[in-house]
Image (cartoon, rainbow, N blue to C red):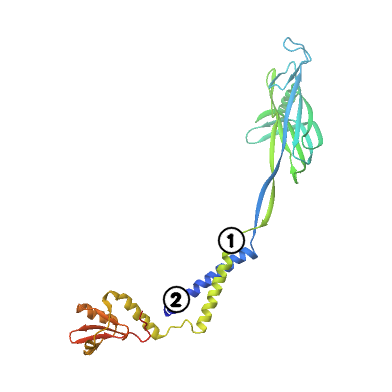
Amino acid sequence: MGVRGRLLLSDNLTLLVGVLVVLAALGGGVSYATYVEPGTVTESEPVGQWATTAGYTHSATVTEDTEAFPAGTVLENRETYFTEVAPVLDGRFSYRFDAPGGEVNATVETVLVFRSADEEREYWRVEEPLNSTSATLGPGERVTTAFQVNTTRATARLDRISSEVGASPGETSVFVVSRVTADGQTLGESVDAGGRYQLGFDLGTGTYSVTGPRGESNRRTVTAVETRTREYGPLRTVGGPLLLLLGLGGLASLAFGWQQGLLAVSAAERRALAFARERDEFDEFISRGTPSRAALERPAVRVDSLADLVDVAIDSDRRVIEDPEARNYYVLLGDERYECSPPRTYEFD
């Protein structure tokens, strides 16, 4: 290694050691996180879907002959029925399970609800069981529950309950609720496919209206969750060990060089380098040449530095003569010669 390189290392040794320590620590940390404790990553991927479909169908049979509807006429899936001629609603609640595979155990409980409530609270509630059905459903299979509601009797009972309570601060209503509990297995996981469905009644004067879902679907996606060891790209798998090797190798090299004295720069070498910097700085004022014998016989004036010699040349409008063979620098001025000698370790180009 040259003197300039050794001087650069010697003057910046503390900074260089700090940089190498940081590189080694960074490389060690990245390598540890990449190879020893890489961590895990959780990924989810859709594997399929399953769905349930539920809804009500209903009808009412005309019980009295009328000009509009003969007795025995079945009115189906209307929004409005006539209380006088068809007071009894025949309802059917159907629940279907659709999936690529598996099965669920389903129970359907249907009740008639009398209630008084407002937007904030429920004041009273009475439930009357209508029907209950259980079944095991495979893909595409359904369970159906039938029930009947006599709207004339329902209206009378609603009025009786309100009268017994003595007051109804909220709004009274009658509706059918079908509660479904369904659990089982599909697509490799346990499923809870239950739900609550409602068929509402608007009991008017001479008519009643029915509102509720005809075929409400609830579709769900099943995802497979996989936890695997995190993988890294070449920036970490290669970069981490390289940083560690660079840091530790650099520290080891500096320690060896310092112990063997390979980084030491002597005072003479420092003086030679300082002179070389001055030579480069004042190159425009210096010319190479060999003074004549007569010039060298002039009385000599020694100056302390090349900078001083350049000042003499500038002040006298002369050039500094560099004589590599004599290893000397001159300014020839009148009957005198001004001269400056570089350090003995200085090397001429």
Of the residues shown, which amino acid type is indicated by label 2? Asn
From this view, report whether residue 313 is shown above or below residue 136: below
**Where, by quadrant of the figure, is residue 31 drawn?**
bottom right
Relative image position of residue 53 (x, y in whole percent)? 72, 34
Query: Which residue is found at the position 26% from the left and 85% from the top?
Result: 339
Of the residues shown, which amino acid type is indicated by label 1? Pro
Relative image position of residue 274 (x, y in whole percent)? 35, 80
Query: Which residue is found at the position 79% from the left and 30% from the top?
Result: 145
Badge number at residue 234: 1
Q: Which residue is mark 2?
A: 12
Specify whether 161 is left or right of 245.
right
- Which circle's residue, 1 or 2, is located before the other in the chain? 2
Badge number at residue 306: none
From this view, report whether residue 114 is shown above or below residue 233: above
Query: Which residue is found at the position 47% from the left and 76% from the top?
Result: 14
Name the residue at the left extreme. Answer: 334
* Circle 2 crowding by C-alpha within 10 Å: few under 14, some 14–19, many from 20: few
Tell me how many marks there are. 2
Specify whether 257 is left or right of 68.
left
**Where, by quadrant of the figure, is residue 128 drawn?**
top right
Assess whether mark 2 and mark 1 are in contact (beta carbons under 8 angstroms): no
**Disc 2, SS:** loop
